[in-house]
Image (cartoon, helix red, strand yellow):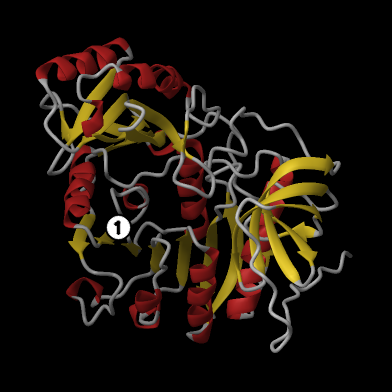
Amino acid sequence: MTKHRTLRFQPAGGERKAQLPVGKKQKLVIERLANDGRGIAFVDGRSWFVAGGLPGEEVEARVLATRAQVVEARVERVLRAAELRRAPACAHAGSCGGCTLQHLPHEEQLALKRRSLAEQLQRLAGVEPDEWAAPLVGPELAYRRRARIAVRWDAKGKRLEVGFRAAASQDIVGIDDCPVLVQPLQPILRALPALLRGLDKPQVLGHVELFHGTQSAVLLRHTAPLGEADLQRLRAFCAAHDAQLWLHGAGEPEADQPGLELGYRLDAFGLQLSYRPGDFVQVNGRVNQAMVEQALDWLAPQTEERVLDLFCGLGNFALPLAQRVREVVAVEGVEAMVERARGNAEANGLGNLHFFRADLSKPLAGAPWASRGFDAILLDPPRDGAFEVVREIDRLGARRLVYVSCNPATLARDAGELIRQGYRLKRAGILDMFPHTAHVEAMALFERG
């Protein structure tokens, strides 16, 4: 077994080293990977975190930032490549900030994410699951059904920059092809820069978001009203690409034409959920459906049970759950999302759901919807986790709980609290929602007793 080295920092009271200037180049030997996928190297008492480096490689790296004895850098040149290294699928890998791990084989990416989850669970909760589930995976490429395109007017050059944010900076990298976007969005992305640069007032543009669900959609953020000629150009562009046009000015995003609906399907359950640009939806449609199926399989809801869905959003889990149990209580913090979830339940003919709005970052404080208790609970919180809710879980009486997480650190913190209340971590695994990134989504099953 490989013995990992601990980070080495300059001892207190030692001679203070001069700061390394940003842009300085340094030859390094990468020793191992950090949990975020960056290579780690050590030189003169400093710990280097190097984007694009793999264990065993000799690289030339450029300094991006320094603090104390920690240096952030990125690979400029690979002098001796590791056998693991593979050619990225995207020509913009290394400059675009979207995909940071395309040089690492997919199986190694999955192993890295599982190690990250395991280390957080052990460090923060002192626990390991009784069983590790196999990673939940989908396609490596052409998976992303939502993307934000950065737009910035260069007043000096009188030119509109269009693309994705660069790695570790606010620069914009011009992108003419993105292999991780779903196929219907590819031609829209390729034609978008020319469209935007051809508008009469490109300087009023904020950003553009692309969506694909039951139909493709283009959302344009603008900081001042658009002229009629520009609106006609946008409408013609969307018509040519069979896409809806949505505009986002001072208020909420609005469809250019009244009555437009956008949604996505959960085919395994025969459900269709409507949403509006700006609502939270998982970017990976295939993994999202597999995630819902796995969550229901792990939770094992029974016909006569009452189930609680916390942070329910549009009803991504609540609607499938309602097909299997007597009653679902679904709770969300944003009133607009509660209303859309309620509408989705009605549109799909489900009458056994009850939706409530509550601030789930605060204690439940005797919420009436929680008074009768539950047989099982599913929660899918944001990155901050669900500590205040978890602190009161035991009084809800559920014997089974599935926790879906987008942050292993807060999952591990909350797992420690659940274990203190008498739950056991029966199963855990990663969900590969974002291939080629270090972002870790996870699922954990807790059972009481």
Who's the residue at 34% across and 78% down the image? 396
Q: Nearer the viewer, residue 239 or 225?
A: 225
Q: Secondary structure at mark 1?
A: loop
Question: Would you place residue 361 above or below residue 420 in this image?
Answer: above
Left of 384 or right of it: where is 82? right
Left of 229 or right of it: where is 117? right
Q: Could you tell me the amino acid type at mark 1?
A: Arg
* Percent position of residue 302, x then y: 41, 59
Q: Residue furthest right?
A: 1
* Percent position of residue 419, x then y: 53, 81
Residue 36 visible to an observer of this rendering: yes
Quadrant assignment, res 212: top left
* Percent position of residue 440, x then y: 56, 55
Q: Pick the quarter of the image with the C terminus.
A: bottom right
Left of 109 or right of it: where is 300? left
Q: Pick the quarter of the image with the N terminus.
A: bottom right
Quadrant assignment, res 9: bottom right
Who's the residue at 21% across and 67% down the image? 358
Q: Nearer the viewer, residue 37 or 242?
A: 37
Residue 397 visible to an observer of this rendering: no
Who's the residue at 49% across and 79% down the image? 418
Q: Nearer the viewer, residue 131 or 108?
A: 108
* Percent position of residue 393, x then y: 38, 78
Question: Would you place residue 200 above or below residue 105 in this image?
Answer: above
Number of on-image labels: 1
Question: Would you place residue 115 above or below residue 271 in this image?
Answer: below
The residue under label 1 is 326
Question: Would you place residue 298 above or below residue 386 in this image?
Answer: above
